Amino acid sequence: MSTNSDLNLDYVANLARLALSDAEKAQFAHQLGDILHYVEKLKQVDVTGVEPMAHASPVFNVWEADVARPGLPVEAALRNAPAQRQNMIVVPKVVE
Amino acid sequence: MANDLIFQSAARLAALLAAGKLSSVELLQSCLARTKAVDGRVKAFNSYDEAGALALAKAADARRAAGQARGPLDGIPVGLKDVIAVEGQPLTCSSRMLANFVSPYDATVTSKLKAAGAIPFGRLNMDEFAMGSSTENSAFGPTANPWDLTRVPGGSSGGSAAAVAAGELPLALGSDTGGSIRQPAALCGIVGLKPTYGLVSRYGLAAYASSLDQIGTMAHTVEDAAMLLGIIAGHDPRDSTSFKAEVPDYRAGLAAKKGPWRLGVPKEFFGAGLDPEIGAAVKQAIEFYRKQGCEIKEVSLPLAAEHAIAVYYLIATAEASSNLARYDGIRYGHRSAAAKDAIDIYAKSRAEGFGAEVKRRIILGTHVLSSGYYDAYYLRAQKVRTLIRNEFTAVLRDCDALLSPTSPVPAFRIGEKSADPLAMYLTDIYTISVNLAGLPGISIPCGFTGAGLPVGLQLIGRPFQEADLLAVAHAYESAHDWHTKHPVLS
């Protein structure tokens, strides 16, 4: 397992699409350093041959019939949109 | 009339409604009056829709008058943590990100409440996106503990716990990812039940950590928690982890199932860090069961005790970083006015919309899933999770339930732990492994500290055996009067 200094906040914040202020970066570097140091203890556990567990429910491969059903009406789906026009969500231009 | 209804159990209110001695409108008016009198100090509610709830109460009274009542909870208000969708109502998750969001549909649990005639009432405060153990991470300000307004109610379902404890509502729903129902229930002196993962549909529950999240019930009594569970449990095709289990009559099971039971006491859950007054109260509860003829066995859960918090904060933050990617400022939620292009919209909207703890967990989760770290952090945590689950499976082969404290500490002061996230995380030490293993757990009142703060007893059961777990809890509650004691909020 890695050491605390491996957390590159600028790199990870960009991956997470999260603009952090300098004050937040300083605070998080310290706090996340503590937490990453704490989780280092998992290195002590022998996990040789152990299957990873994704969730606890004894349910796998759930299939549904391929039948069309009504979805949310357009007005309901757009009700919370930050900007909309002609039944579409307005976003800034993404292609030049 | 109104004051007599405060702190009454839902079972008692249901009996009054059935006997025609109380109307649903009178009951709701009583809840409204109490809320208006005390919630300025408790701050359990983010909002409530008085007119909408009154219309539902009138409809419930009309059904009952026509002999068409839909069941015992018809006409009884149930508070909802502000993370569970109710069509046409706000769904803020106590976040600036969703401050103006209105649900376009009902969660499955909401549909089930409505089908039973219960009145979904109020949006209850919480830690932002259910991330926290004190309700201090709410963007709308902290909720206070009704037993001591300078202290936290626990979290993340702190608003739900405080509303019930303060007598504002007889019942509430919360969600529990690492203890978020049981811990606030313990700190507020009420009953809080986290069902087995998969028993209650998560459809319409804003996701935090999907492999751990579960909706559950908060109430004055075990019987009330059982009644409400019976309504919200059951298979739902809209949640692919929902289990096709029979839903028994949990309430009837309380009287039908009698001990003696074989009860395990995990020795590691009584070690360093446990408040001595809490340890003493829980040991007295264990003695009660022994005197009832139960076989008390010391059991050992070394990995759960030592590693559950580390495993949880890797898995839960990884899942959160993925789940909360949907809040991008495009389709719904906060959109930054300062953003220039698409990437800028994401980064600035999220920076402005999320609070500090949510940002911390997204950063941590993104880091542990990132290339080069996935195997060392996330995958290893998933493997240790398997070992923790196996530990519980082995112990529960010989025990009907396990007994432990719910929280190592009583309600702490507002601000006491908010600057130290790791110290806050450690308050979930006895509850978190139950979510990792997917088991049902319940916290019930088992005493008070010398300072008058409630203490919770946690009972952990076998998967999908809530009926047994509730019966064990009910046996204790029936012989004690902790649940009849209530905070004074003059």
Image (spheres, grey):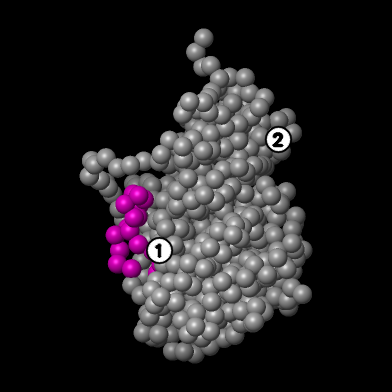
Give neighbour class at mark 2: few <14, some 14-19, many 20+ (Cα, 10 Å). some
Q: Position of residue B186 (x, y in %)?
A: 60, 69
Label 2 with label 1: CB-CB less than 8 Å: no
Identity of the residue drawn at 33% across and 68% down: B247
Q: Secondary structure at mark 2?
A: helix
Q: Position of residue B282 (x, y in %)?
A: 58, 77
Q: Which residues are magenta?
A: B226-247
Check the image and name the residue furthest to the top.
A96
Magenta span includes B305? no
In this rendering, the answer to whether B478 lies above or below B414 is: below
Identity of the residue drawn at 54% across and 77% down: B23
Q: Position of residue B29 (x, y in %)?
A: 62, 70
Kind of residue at disc 1: Ala
Nearer the observer, B268 or B195: B195
Badge 1 is on which residue? B115
Nearer the observer, B304 or B431: B431
Q: Position of residue B306 (x, y in %)?
A: 53, 57
Of circles 2 and 1, which is in front?
Answer: 1
Task: Using residue B246 as the reference point, say whether residue B159 is left or right of it.
Answer: right
Residue A24: image tag: 2
Identity of the residue drawn at 35% across and 75% down: B249
